[in-house]
Image (tube, grey):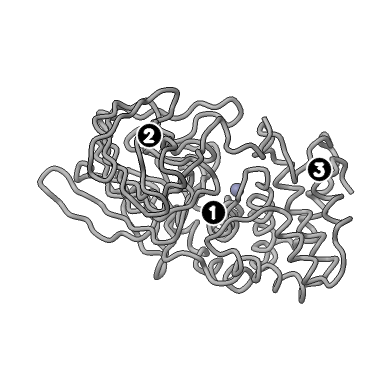
Amino acid sequence: MALSDTGLLGHGNHGYRVSHYDLELATKPATGRLSGKARLTVVAAAADTPLVFDLGPFRIERVLVDGKPVRWTHRGGKVRIRGRFLVDTPFPVEIRYAGRPTPVRTRYWGEVGWDELTDGVIVASQPVGAPSWFPCDDHVGAKATFRIEVTVPTAYTVVANGVLSARTSGGSTATWTYVADEPMAPYLATVQIGLYERILLSPGQILAVSRGLSRAAQHDFARQPKMMRVFTELFGPYPFAEYAVVVTDDELEVPVEAQGLSIFGANHVDGHRGHERLVAHELAHQWFGNSVGLADWQHIWLNEGFAAYAEWLWSERSGGPRAETLAARSRALLATMPQNLRIGDPPARDMFDDRLYQRGALTLHTLRTLVGDEVFFPLLREWTATHRHGTVVTSDFAALAQRHAGRSLTAFFDQWLYQPSLP
Ligand SMILES: [Zn+2]
């Protein structure tokens, strides 16, 4: 499967775009059931092209376009709506649905999307899990603003993207409303539900964790506010209103980034900052991957290479080994691994391969040594400023780097990104 295709697994659609998702959800972790009302603000490109949305195996109760019932089908993970639509003028599409969400099973990336925890819910959708909980145009480059409202039993805390704008309680349930005004790709949308306390780490930085893990987590994330200052200095202003970290009571294979928040497992907290590298990695994704998003998954090294390099930058800025030392280690490691991956155009199977992360970071470090810090860091800041809340491809970065360097870097990027053997 080539990553330059329209979307992964046939997700993502044509003929319209969504500018806003308004999601009203209700769930009870004890039953695992979800009911939802999704109101999408849609701009169609043609009057008679059916509107097609990605949505998992829910029972659809009704579909309204501009407030009127329409004909629709729901097959193979696609909701198809026929009719005549306004062109170039936004109109609402409302889909009511219910069922027991299940994650999307994938061949290479395991199960992604809405999933049950021992007592709660986690949503980790990268790369194709979004339709497991709401109807969407599930393409990495299809950004929209969101309002996410979730009703749960009162004992639970809900964390979602954006800023908590309201929490209202009605007897046995509470409704949490989050507003994300910065455009977001559907895969980065998330809802986390658990028996969490919300702790303020510093203004704008929230930690959601259960009482049992609270002490260890507060120690492990205590340097995150400093990390935020360092990254702001290196990468430019933090691109979102707030940053939340959720630590689940369950163990997770890897932490997950979402827009404006990251999710860590109980196993990533040890009370000794044993996983601070991951704290840096996930925070860096807010600039690289979330604000500066991908137009296409082919360019995923722009997310993972930058986040992996941020780990090294944090290390050298926080008294750990210097980036140079970590680069040498990484190069030695890569030299022992098969050299058959072109990180600038990886196959779907290798999107999350460690070699892509390592070599991506090494590419950036080599670029930094080539052009010097006085060119490299202003380049990073212009990259995040120019493409803030937008989408990019690799050639955008190569062109900007070349302009900052004042010389051709064609051979450099070709060797590092498009030749399988290690330069
Ligand atoms: Zn990452």
The image quarter in which residue 342 lies: top right
What residue is rendered at 68% in x and 34% in y? Answer: 2
Amino acid on which disc 3 is placed: Leu
Q: Secondary structure at mark 1?
A: loop
Of 327 and 217, the residue lying toward us: 327
Residue 189 image point, x, y percent: 43, 47
Q: Is mark 2 within 8 Å of ligand 1?
A: no
Placement of 118 over or under 245, stated as above or below: above
Q: Residue at x 24, y 32 (%)?
A: 62
User: Mark 2: which secondary structure?
Assistant: strand
| Residue lying at 48% horizontally and 44% vertically, measured from the top left | 187
- Residue 76's image quarter? top left
* Residue 97 can be seen, yes or no: yes
Q: What residue would you read off at disc 3?
A: 334
Inter-mark Cα distance, 2 to 1 = 25 Å
Dot 1 or dot 3: first in sequence order is 1
Tag 2: amino acid? Leu
Q: CA distance from mark 3 to mark 2?
A: 35 Å
The foreground one among 406 and 31 is: 406
Residue that sits furthest to the left in the current view = 171
Which circle's residue, 2 or 1, is located before the other in the chain?
2
Q: Are marks 2 and 1 in contact (CB under 8 Å)?
A: no
User: Which residue is under mark 1?
Assistant: 272
Q: Dot 2: within a 10 Å radius of its alpha carbon, few (fewer than 14), some, or many (20 or more) residues?
A: some
Q: Position of residue 362 (x, y in %)?
A: 78, 54
